[in-house]
Amino acid sequence: MNDPQEPARALQGNDSKTQSAPKSLRTLALDYSPSLLHPLLQRLGDSELGSRLALGVFWSMAGSMVARGLMLCATVLVARILGRSVYGELGMIQSSIGLFSILAGFGMGLTAAKHVAEYRQGDPERAGRIIGLSVLFALLTGGAMALGLFFFAPSLAKHTIDAPHLARPLRIGALMPFIDALSGAQIGALSGLEAFKAIACVNLLVGFVSCPVLIAGAYFGGLTGAVWALVINLCINCMLIHIALRRQAKGHCVPLTFVDCGREWPVLWRFTLPAFLSAVLVGPVNWVCNAMLVNQQDGYSEMGMFTAAFLFQNVLLATTGVLNAPLLAILSSSASVKNKELETANILSSWFLGLVPAIPLLCFPELAEIFFGGDYAGHTFRVTFVIVAFTASILVYRSGLLRAMQARGLLWWGLGNNLLWAAVLLPTAYCTAKYGASGLAAAYAIAYISTSVVFVPVYLKYASIPKALLLSKDAAAIWLVVVILATMTLFESSILCRSIALPLGLFVAGSRMRNIWVENSR
């Protein structure tokens, strides 16, 4: 339990070179961190669970943060190069392709991550069969969706999004659902193997390559060039993931084979089907809402503004998302053991990591205007941005609950959550889309608030999570801070007032979060 090399053996198998990596990281952390943090770092190093989590989060962040940062810079430049209307067209193309990609993935990435983590040590042959089943299904469903998008692109462009000239870019992007599905299944398997260092290396390489490719594509080829750049980047990503998976599976003695993978069909019913149905709901509903917006007057200009605002939400969720794979893997492999510290870390980590950037953005949406330029400046964009940042605060609040449900295989409850979300969002968006980007952003906020009120208590009950983690006076104080800051910005309070309110809000939220941790991790 106290052997500092034990987490490395769990992470990398028998590779003697990688066993020394955790020790080096621990030494660097102790050497370059404030002495105040040394007791915490020592405690993490002495705990197998803590070391696994720290290593997983470190490598996830090391690769993902740099890659996401590079892509954010590239996307901002692309938005400037293309202009608001054409960038809105690119956003609609990505939304349409994303819909097919979700269908193509069939939830196989999540299936592989959960079950490979569960069986890789006790039953590596079964883990290998699940990887084989995941990849096989991804190939079949990805190929079907790619062909469907290619053949129906002209009709989709003409009759649904009212832009016949987008048929060719849609056909070019038809490759993306197939590549996405295959990459998703393999990255899920890597996560289940806790091969987060390998994933980080892939993310870093792809990030450095994707950034110049995307900018060059948009600059020299406009909208079509940008779509080709997205396809090329996905191909590079898929190739590197495949190489990493073969190496990691060999190191963990997990056989990669399609032979006899049909024995694992029951997994598809218990876990994959509800995950897939949930995704099937989310993708089309998002796409329909976007279609409602672009069919309004000046719709693609509003779509460009909405896409720009949601870019920051996506980056925020991607930042907190670096915790998903490590925590899901550890929760899945430790499902039979009650651990209060792990439960508390699972719930609070994403919430805290998401609120740190969300609160300043709620106060100063003008920062986003600086990034995107004058074409996106104005009161409408600031209102849209604040609503989107508020919605992101809700999503990071719920993310730990979703991981706990996934680790326990309670995916059918997640499907119920998404059904309610769709039932609220679609009619609300129908009524608010006429108000442009801010109206659609408000519809999303209303839908997520509604589902949280209904399903957070349900999740707490069935996932066996202590109520005080999310429903307490301290949690209420944090939400009060978020609401007050958002309201001040929406009603255009002066920059001076917001500058005073920001540090106060951060202090209150931070101290209340600390109280929740202390009370629940004892």
Image (cartoon, rainbow, N blue to C red):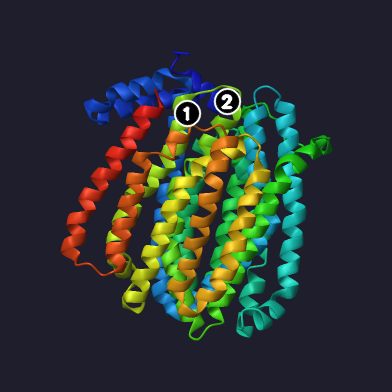
Q: Residue at point 83% right, 38% down?
A: 262
**Residue type of the residue flagged with mark 1:** Leu
* Residue 204 visible in the current orientation: no
* Residue 277 visible in the current orientation: yes
Residue labelled with disc 1? 342
Label 2–label 1 contact, CB within 8 A = yes
The Cα atoms of the two marked residues, 2 and 1, are separated by 10 Å
Viewer-proximal residue, 129 or 379?
379
Q: Position of residue 36 (x, y in %)?
A: 23, 26
Q: Residue at point 57% right, 21% down?
A: 337
Quadrant holding the C terminus? top left
Q: How packed is label 1: few (under 14 Cα within 10 Å), some, or many (20 or more)?
A: some
Q: Position of residue 413 (x, y in %)?
A: 64, 45
Q: Residue at point 60% right, 44% down?
A: 187
Q: How packed is label 2: few (under 14 Cα within 10 Å), some, or many (20 or more)?
A: some
Outermost top residue: 2
Left or right: 277 in relation to 237: right
Mark seen at residue 275: none
Left or right: 250 in relation to 125: left
Mark seen at residue 334: 2
Q: Position of residue 115 (x, y in %)?
A: 67, 34
Viewer-proximal residue, 278 or 107?
278
Left or right: 209 in relation to 187: left
Relative to 86, residue 359 above or below: above
First in sequence: mark 2 or mark 1?
2
- Secondary element at tag 1: helix
**Residue type of the residue flagged with mark 2:** Ser
Q: Position of residue 260 (x, y in %)?
A: 84, 35
Relative to 437, residue 69 above or below: above
Residue 129 sits in quarter: top right
Q: Residue at point 70% right, 57% down?
A: 104
